[in-house]
């Protein structure tokens, strides 16, 4: 049985009710986990209010600001987790950002600043948070991050985010190797395209979704709930032998080649 009772789970990356992190938080809650939620603070406190209202039904016992580009805030978040919970069991990393200018146009035009920002927020942040979580995961633990096929294959316009996801997937393997002796497992979920705040800001996302609906083995896209269920599995003892992996939750899209062609045409 999938049971997360008695487990403390810190979930990052909830922006609204379409966030994949929101789908994950709901499934962890359903499995009985005690939740801590982080939000990206802004000047007017709008995000804090919005996320607080959204997660209220899940009764999180911690609700903390977290901007991974602010090292002091990362340290204080994990200090609070240690002080309030004593131990951490589950860390959900759902953070990514690239400048819009770098998600369109020529990849060879990627600026040094854009590259640095994308890799810092989307890939380095996993190292940073795993490093802070390590000493709190005294009973073992599970770290789950979100990646995308664009880190392995060229997807139009994904550009510098593809490089960030390639780095993130390699971070998963190096972290899994280091933390394995502490019984801390580290895995990634490679989700198929889903309409979210992050993806709908991207031109052509609807065409990509229609393409997946046409060629993926399951002939559809995946839902936040399906990603959430896989995350719950990866955080539970049911997956105790799995670490360092990238699990595709993409309706099977990743296995296909010749994706435009029809066999019987
Ligand atoms: O990883 C992502 C989204 C990443 C993302 C999206 C944005 C939009 C708004 C990172 N940074 C930003 N910055 C912004 O200013 N996905 C897997 C969704 C996604 O993004 C794409 C996709 C898909 C799919 C970008 C280009 C092409 C496909």
Image (cartoon, rainbow, N blue to C red):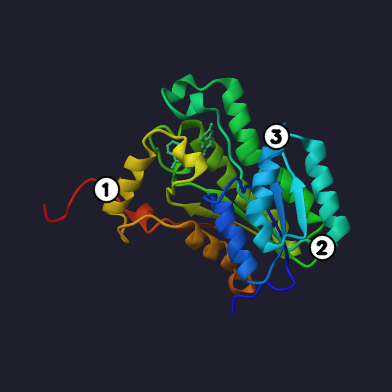
> Residue 20 at x, y = what percent?
54, 52
Residue found 37% across the figure and 58% down from its top: 252
- Residue 98 vertical position relative to residue 198 in the rendered view, above or below: above
> Residue 33 at x, y = what percent?
69, 68
Residue found 49% across the figure and 45% down from its top: 196
Mark 2, Cα crowd under 10 Å, few <14 / some 14-19 / many 20+, is many
The reply to whether discs 3 and 1 touch (Cβ–Cβ < 8 Å) is: no
> Residue 107 at x, y = what percent?
44, 25
> Residue 108 at x, y = what percent?
45, 22
Mark 3, Cα crowd under 10 Å, few <14 / some 14-19 / many 20+, is few
The reply to whether discs 3 and 2 touch (Cβ–Cβ < 8 Å) is: no
Quick one: label 2 or label 1, which is nearer the N terminus?
2
Establish whether ligand 1 lies closer than 8 Å to the Cβ of label 2: no
Residue 259 numbered tag: 1
Report which residue position mark 3 lands on.
Answer: 42
Measure the alpha-carbon separation of dots 3 and 1: 42 Å
Of labels 3 and 1, the one closer to you: 3
Of labels 2 and 1, the one closer to you: 2
- Residue 37 vertical position relative to residue 41 in the rendered view, above or below: below
Kindly tell me whether residue 129 is visible in this rendering. yes
Report which residue position mark 2 lands on.
Answer: 87
Where does the N terminus fall, quadrant-wise?
Answer: bottom right
Establish whether ligand 1 lies closer than 8 Å to the Cβ of label 1: no
The reply to whether discs 2 and 1 touch (Cβ–Cβ < 8 Å) is: no
Mark 1, Cα crowd under 10 Å, few <14 / some 14-19 / many 20+, is some
SS for dot 3 = loop
Residue 66 occupies which quadrant of the picture? top right
Judge by depth and name the residue closer to the eye, 240 or 117.
Answer: 117
Residue 69 occupies which quadrant of the picture? top right
Please identify the residue farthest to the bottom as the structure is shown: 1
- Residue 26 vertical position relative to residue 119 in the rendered view, above or below: below
Kindly tell me whether residue 243 is visible in this rendering. no
């Amino acid at each position: 049985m999938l049971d997360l009772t008695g487990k403390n789970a810190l979930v990052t990356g909830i922006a609204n009710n379409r966030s994949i992190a929101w789908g994950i938080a709901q499934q962890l809650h359903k499995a009985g986990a005690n939740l801590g939620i982080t939000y990206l603070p802004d000047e007017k406190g709008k995000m804090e209010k919005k996320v607080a209202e959204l997660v209220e039904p899940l009764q999180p016992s911690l609700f903390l600001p977290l901007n991974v580009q602010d090292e002091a805030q990362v340290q204080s978040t994990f200090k609070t987790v240690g002080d309030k919970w004593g131990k951490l069991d589950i860390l959900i990393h759902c953070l990514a950002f690239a400048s819009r200018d770098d998600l369109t146009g020529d990849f060879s035009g990627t600026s040094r600043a854009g590259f640095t920002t994308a890799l810092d927020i989307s890939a380095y942040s996993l190292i940073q948070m795993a490093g802070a979580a390590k000493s709190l995961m005294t009973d073992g633990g599970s770290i789950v991050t979100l990646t995308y096929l664009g880190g392995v294959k060229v997807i139009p316009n994904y550009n510098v985010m593809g490089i960030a996801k390639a780095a993130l997937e390699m971070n998963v393997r190096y972290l899994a190797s280091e933390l394995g002796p502490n019984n801390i497992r580290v895995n990634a979920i490679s989700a198929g395209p889903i309409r979210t705040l992050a993806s709908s800001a991207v031109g052509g996302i609807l065409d990509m979704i229609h393409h997946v609906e046409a060629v993926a083995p399951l002939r559809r896209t995946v839902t936040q709930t399906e990603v959430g269920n896989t995350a719950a599995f990866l955080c539970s003892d049911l997956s105790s032998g799995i670490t360092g992996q990238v699990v595709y939750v993409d309706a099977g899209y990743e296995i296909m080649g010749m994706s435009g062609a029809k066999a019987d045409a």
